[in-house]
Image: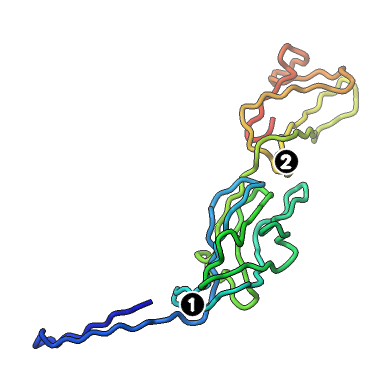
């Protein structure tokens, strides 16, 4: 940017001169990723990529379409892959348009589906955001609400009269353990002959024993 320099005689303060110089950035040496730090699986996050020189100045000559590779978010348990502008992020470089060193608005929209805490990095094959955590985006992707349930057992015993435990998990539409709390679920069996002990007191088949309350996505 413009820099103004003033020189003043320390003995005769009336003798002074000033000048203005335009100081340009050096060639971009790194990329920085900016965006929302928290999002929900299946939602979108508008990323901004900035090209800077070694001193942190924006390289205004870094313009046009750049082939960028993005790193970080993974595919969800149900196989939903992260995307940038609708393109599979894992597939390879994605064209992102830059103007004066900054990616255009809406040119790098992230859609992520796996619930996780992850670092988002980017590279154009020559410069990247890996050199410092400050250049990357630390992102938390939270699961969505309960869309379906799964029932599992680690103690199943296929013998009449032998009790076994079951765990009910709630999942969002992408296969992440859901974030639902205080959701009451009802347990039934296809034969109708199983008895449940929902309150855990060791007595099976009591009134209300078919009910369980989901907390942190599980019963």
Are the residues at dot 1 and dot 2 in contact (C-beta closer than 8 Å)?
no
Nearer-N-terminus badge (1/2) = 1
Cα separation between marks 1 and 2: 42 Å
Assign the N terminus to one quadrant of the image: bottom left
Image coordinates of residue 184 in percent, x first then y, are 67, 24
Residue in the picture at 62% in, 57% down: 109
Q: Which residue is mark 1?
A: 53
Residue 173's disc is 2
Query: Quarter of the image containing the C terminus?
Result: top right
How far from the left and from the top, in percent, is residue 37? 53, 53
SS assignment at label 1:
loop
Left or right: 97, with 166 as reference point: left
Crowd rating for badge 2 (residues with CA inside 10 Å; few <14, some 14–19, many 20+):
some
Q: Residue 153 at x, y = what percent?
A: 80, 33
Vertical placement of 23 versus 143: above or below?
Answer: below
Q: At 74% across and 31% down in the image, what residue appears?
A: 168
Q: Residue at x 70, y 39 (%)?
A: 172
In the displayed structure image, the side of residue 205 where residue 62 appears, left or right: left
State left or right for residue 78 relative to residue 10. right
- Horizontal arrangement in the rendering, residue 149 relative to residue 13 (left or right): right
68 vs 214, nearest the viewer: 68
């Amino acid at each position: 940017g413009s820099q103004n320099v003033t020189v003043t005689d320390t003995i005769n303060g009336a003798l002074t001169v000033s000048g203005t110089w335009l100081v340009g950035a050096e060639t971009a040496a790194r990329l920085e990723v900016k965006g929302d730090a928290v999002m929900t699986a299946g939602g979108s996050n508008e990323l901004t990529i900035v090209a800077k020189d070694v001193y942190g100045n924006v390289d205004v000559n870094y313009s046009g379409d750049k082939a960028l590779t993005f790193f970080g978010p993974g595919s969800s348990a149900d196989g939903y892959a992260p995307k940038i502008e609708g393109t599979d992020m894992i597939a390879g470089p994605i064209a992102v348009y830059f103007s004066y060193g900054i990616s255009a608005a809406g040119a790098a929209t992230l859609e992520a589906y796996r619930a996780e805490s992850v670092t988002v990095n980017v590279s154009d094959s020559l410069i990247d955001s890996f050199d410092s955590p400050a250049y990357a985006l630390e992102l938390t992707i939270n699961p969505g609400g309960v869309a379906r349930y799964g029932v599992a057992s680690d103690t199943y015993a296929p013998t009449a009269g032998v009790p076994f435990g079951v765990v009910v998990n709630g999942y969002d539409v992408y296969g992440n353990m859901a974030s639902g709390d205080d959701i009451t679920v009802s347990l039934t069996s296809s034969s109708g002959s199983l008895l449940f002990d929902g309150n855990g007191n060791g007595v099976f088949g009591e009134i209300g024993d078919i009910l369980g309350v989901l907390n942190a996505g599980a019963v």
